[in-house]
């Protein structure tokens, strides 16, 4: 495993990390969670991602219990959670000072931890003044409940606004963003955020590097039973795959598959390695329903160095979606 700084921060994250979205609390329990986390941990993964919204809080409970059972040294781990979607109560959602503090307390209790290393604002909240949100997130860091705070799926303009307020008010500044990024979703990470990597030292913990499984190739011949797209709560994935755009993307996956074969890797490993080629990425978050899948994903690290200029050019020719050269970081 190799490690990267979280933007300009001193903390280091494993290049591949493990997230609990979808699987924890929905597809399996604590024993399965521990098996997957153990496989990741043994491969050198130190970053484990979660959120108050995942499985209605059950995901955090499972991760906390798995870490307790494993007996791992807390300082060896980088654990995150995200605050925004806390429940149905009138103050259980959003980024008000009340929900940020109440939500953080609840997350720590579920995780059985005194602190998380990273806490994210899971979405922007246009109903709450930015100053209130920035003050509350900075307060979490001052209290020692989190070491760094950041954002998820915020625009570059919103991140700059929060950063400027923190700078002006002498508060802890947002350090990282958690955006979606994969071969078919590139504009925000490669173009919109590009100035932020140098201007404010923004780090990124990217999610969905396999495009909800589409880039594994498992949907090339249809939607197999037992896949994420068949889960009741993820009907949107099925609809996206079966739509015109999804079918066009699957056609490109079919063209990319021979390149993966030439490199001696799976399509999933190629897609993960491709994400790691971008300098603006601090860590690529992976997910899996079985420990064997975790181990397979970790082998993507062996593929990164095989993606030389010629291979990358062949991939770009198939994708045909590279952001404008003068504004792209790749």
Image (cartoon, rainbow, N blue to C red):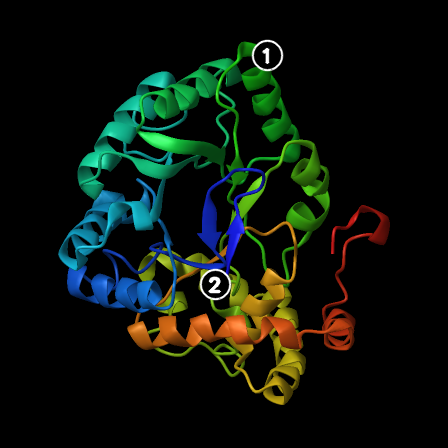
**Quadrant of the image occupied by residue 197:** top right
Q: Residue furthest right?
A: 326
Q: Give residue 141's position: percent from left, percent from top.
A: 38, 25
Q: Indicate which label's residue lies in the foreground, 1 or 2.
A: 1
Q: Earlier in the sequence, mark 1 or mark 2?
A: 1
Residue at horizontal 32%, vertical 38%?
A: 116
- Residue 239 falls left or right of residue 189: left
Q: CA distance from mark 1 to mark 2?
A: 39 Å
Q: What residue is rendered at 76% in x and 59% in y?
A: 322
214 to 196, vertically: above or below: below
In the picture, measured across the screen, residue 323 lies left or right of residue 216, that is: right
User: Which residue is disc 2 drawn over?
Assistant: 212
> Does residue 125 appear to the left or right of 328 in the view shown?
left
Using the image as rendered, state which of residue 140 and residue 305 is in the foreground. Answer: 305
Q: Quadrant of the C terminus?
A: bottom right
In the figure, is residue 3 to the left or right of 199? Answer: left
Q: Is residue 14 above or below residue 112?
A: below
Please name the residue shown 55% across and 78% down the image.
267
Farthest-out residue, left? 69
Residue 110, quarter of the rendered image: top left
Q: Secondary structure at mark 2?
A: loop
What percent of the width, then of the height, locates residue 295? 38, 74
Question: Which circle marks residue 168 in the picture?
Answer: 1
Element type at marker 1? helix
The residue closer to the viewer here, 142 or 22, is 142
Mark 1 surroundings: few (<14), some (14-19) or many (≥20) residues within 10 A: few
User: Is residue 181 visible to us here?
Assistant: yes
57 up-or-down from 114: above or below: below
Are the residues flagged by discs 1 and 2 in contact, CB closer than 8 Å? no
In front: 162, or 215? 162
Q: Judge whether residue 90 can be spotted in this image.
A: no
């Amino acid at each position: 495993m190799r490690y990267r700084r979280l933007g300009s921060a001193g903390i280091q994250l494993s290049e591949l990390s493990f997230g609990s979205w979808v699987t924890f609390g929905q597809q399996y329990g604590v024993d399965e969670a521990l098996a997957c986390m153990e496989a990741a941990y043994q491969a050198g993964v130190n970053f484990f991602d979660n959120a108050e919204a995942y499985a209605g809080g059950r995901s955090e409970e499972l991760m906390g219990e798995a870490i307790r059972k494993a007996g791992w040294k807390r300082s060896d781990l980088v654990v995150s959670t995200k605050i925004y979607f806390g429940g149905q109560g009138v103050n259980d959602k959003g980024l008000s000072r009340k929900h940020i503090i109440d939500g953080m307390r609840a997350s720590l209790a579920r995780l059985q931890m005194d602190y998380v290393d990273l806490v994210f604002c899971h979405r922007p909240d246009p109903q709450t003044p930015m100053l209130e949100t920035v003050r509350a997130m900075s307060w979490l860091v001052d209290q020692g409940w989190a070491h760094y705070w950041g954002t998820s799926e915020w625009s570059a303009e919103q991140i700059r606004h929060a950063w400027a307020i923190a700078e002006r008010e002498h508060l802890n500044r947002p350090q990282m963003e958690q955006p979606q990024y994969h071969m078919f979703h590139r504009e925000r990470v490669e173009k919109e955020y590009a100035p932020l990597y140098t201007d404010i030292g923004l780090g990124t913990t990217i999610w969905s590097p396999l495009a909800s499984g589409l880039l594994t190739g498992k949907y090339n011949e249809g939607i197999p039973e037992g896949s994420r797209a068949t889960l009741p709560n993820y009907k949107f994935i099925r609809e996206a795959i079966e739509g015109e755009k999804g079918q066009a993307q699957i056609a490109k996956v079919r063209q990319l598959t021979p390149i993966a074969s030439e490199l001696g890797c799976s399509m999933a490993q190629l897609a993960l390695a491709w994400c790691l080629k971008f300098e603006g990425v601090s860590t690529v978050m992976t997910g899996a329903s079985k420990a064997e899948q975790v181990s397979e994903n970790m082998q993507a690290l062996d593929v990164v160095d095989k993606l030389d200029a010629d291979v990358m050019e062949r991939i770009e020719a198939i994708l045909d979606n590279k952001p404008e050269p003068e504004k792209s970081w790749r």
